[in-house]
Image (cartoon, helix red, strand yellow):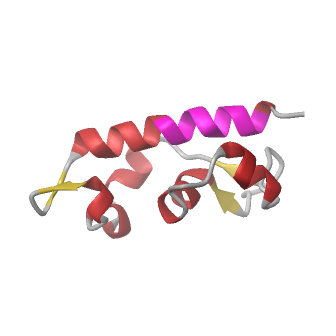
Amino acid sequence: MAKENDYFLNTVENPSYSPGDFQAAGLDASNTTIRPMDSYKNLNAIQSNPEFQTDGKFDSTKFTNAYNNALMGYNQLSTAA
């Protein structure tokens, strides 16, 4: 069964949130997932997001750093008691 929340997309929409903020908002391991990095990379919302651009072009390094930070946050969220 698919989980209703996507942790990476939530971090893109709420960049100032910590894992604790997401947990307080009701996200947890039972209702939240994070997909493999490559499944996000070609999404228009990701490609066109200024957070992942340098000089108006998609910057793979910025994207990878953001994804890895989100993955760490997701792992923290999913192991929270």
Q: Position of residue 77 (x, y in %)?
A: 74, 39
Q: Is residue 2 left or right of residue 44?
A: right
Q: Is residue 74 magenta?
A: yes
Q: How many marks?
A: 0
Placement of the C terminus among the 4 image quadrants: top right
**Above or below 30: residue 56:** below
Q: Residue at x 62, y 38 (%)?
A: 73
Within the image, what quadrant is residue 60 found in?
A: top left
Q: Is residue 44 left or right of residue 35?
A: left
Image side of residue 55 versus residue 10, left or right: left
Residue at the far front in the pictured view: 16
Against 26, is 20 above or below?
above
Question: Where 47 falls versus 68 (above or below)?
Answer: below
Q: Quadrant of the N terminus?
A: bottom right
Q: Residue at x 46, y 35 (%)?
A: 68
Place of residue 31 in the rendered image (x, y in percent of width and height, measured from the top left) = 79, 55
The residue nearer to you, when weighing 34 against 65, is: 65
For image coordinates 35% across by 61% down, the residue present is 46
Q: Position of residue 32 (x, y in %)?
A: 72, 52
Q: Nearer the viewer, residue 39 or 15?
A: 15
Residue range of the region highlighted in magenta in the rendering: 69-78
Q: Which residue extends farthest right?
A: 81
Q: Residue at x 61, y 54 (%)?
A: 17
- Counting from the top left corner in percent of width and height, residue 7 is at 61, 52
Q: Is residue 38 magenta?
A: no
